[in-house]
Image (spheres, rainbow, N blue to C red):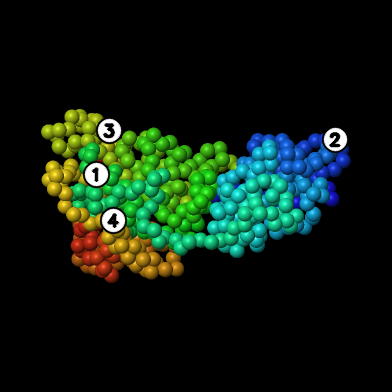
Amino acid sequence: MSFSTILSAAVDGLQAELIRVEADVSNGLPVFHMVGYLSSEVREAGERVRTAIRNSGYEYPPKRTVINLSPAALRKRGSSFDLPIAAAILSALGKIPPGTSEDCLIIGELSLNGRVGKVPGILPMVMEAAAHGIRRCVVPAENASEGALVKDVEIIGVNSLKEAADYLLGERCKEVKRQSANRKSIGETPGSILDGSGNIPDFSQLQGQENVRRAAEIAVAGGHNMLMIGPPGSGKSMTARCIAGILPPMSEEESLEVTRIYSVLGMVDENEPLIRHRPFREVHHTATRAALIGGGAVPRPGEISLAHKGVLFLDELPEFNRSVLEVLRQPLENREIQISRTYGTYRFPAEFMLIAAMNPCPCGNFPDMSKCRCTPAQIQMYLGKISRPFLDRIDLCVEAPRIGFRSLADPAVRECSADIRKRVIRVRELQEERYEGQKIKCNAALRAEDLSRYCELGKQEKLLMERAFSLMELTARGYHRILKTARTIADLDGEEWIRETHLREALSLRMIDGKYWRR
């Protein structure tokens, strides 16, 4: 047999596509030719594959070899085609009997000595294979536990080309690592991913700032965006990091959705591939637009998508380039990022909570004019980096005043994150029950057309909002966000209906921006 076909897969954006690797080995000039709309790294596979085959103990006769990666309309990138190309050649040479590789997906990078190396994007590729009824996947051993997250698919982890060939020949060598879906229950462990060490500060360590603690609880309970304004050292950054410890657990579906994003970027832990906790992404103010929303010649997810289902924390907000902040407006509204290129449109998920912190002026002491050394022009320029349309997408804007000596010298016993998290989970479960059967998971995701049903107001509440709408010069978007916040406050209080007291608290959490950004 001089012709063979092996199934493989490619990742384009966050989506995976099945690829047919076709090999034809025939008499003729000893050339190695590859076609199929290939990138430079795929074209280089020829040298790696031929050398790996010889170094794995197989004879490679000097014949004409043509490799086609189909469909030809899809751009092929990456090094994951090395192993399927080698398997297709061995099959065409008769080293692997025909039919043994049917209903089997093969993925992997080859080194010159025939070793199989780890590749990114295994999870979406195996998920795509399962969707097409494929029940066997040969992957690098380092990716085996990641691939095993997909149910009803046998994952064969191999360390070398020889092991892959032996498996296809039916030999059950000890080195072949078989994995099946064996997932622990999700969401049992409290907390979230904050950094490599997993250290998360507790709210009991935060002294003072009762209003900020309350605002943080409301924000997480309803999935709302929050901005903290205050002088340096007032606990804004610590509050944001404490939020990671009160995030509700993710469902199994959400965990796989988040893990899929990290898999495409090669950021999955080999030993614990499933991301069980909501991400917490802290972005430095030097980040570019592409780093935040994703992009590049070949669009890849950015920090916003890495924060999907979790928190995106922007510290020192005015230090970000204004154009960088403005690109957040569309994802905050639509919960999706759309990047267009001449060869296609890419969509990345962006369902996240934005937590931001900032000083009120360059020196940090405004509006205390006895300490502030900034000129009015400097203050206006500093605050002007945050546009009104951007602020309109913030649900809660809370002031963090300077912490007094007594709060530090005689710290009171504060409520811990575990207690706050219990209330957050209770409220989130209430919202899931309320919005069952809909795409809405939390109050912050309510659409304008849903407010009349879920945020219905009584006569007194309507009068209060009418006065507030006029006095605060609210936009329609700002008005809707206040209603959503009030819905969350009512849920925390165990109330079915939004009362006047809930609206007043929600309004108070939007009045601080008027103090600094005067209309």
Label 1 sits on residue: 235
Query: Residue 384, can we see it?
Result: yes
Percent from the top left, x then y, of residue 509? 23, 52
Q: Secondary structure at mark 2?
A: loop
Q: Name the amino acid type tagged 2.
A: Leu
Q: Earlier in the sequence, mark 2 or mark 3?
A: 2
Q: Secondary structure at mark 4?
A: helix
Label 3 sits on residue: 381
Q: Earlier in the sequence, mark 4 or mark 2?
A: 2
Percent from the top left, x then y, of residue 410? 13, 48
Percent from the top left, x then y, of residue 214? 24, 55
Residue ranking furthest to the front: 174
Instruction: Find out whether the residues at labels 1 and 3 contact each other: C-beta distance under 8 Å.
Output: no
Percent from the top left, x then y, of residue 381? 27, 33
Residue that appears at 84% across and 50% down? 1
Front-lying residue, 83 or 423: 83
Residue that appears at 27% across and 37% down? 383
Query: Looking at the picture, does residue 423 appear above or below residue 193?
Result: below
Q: Earlier in the sequence, mark 1 or mark 4?
A: 1
Residue that appears at 67% across and 46% down? 160
Q: Which mark is residue 270?
A: none
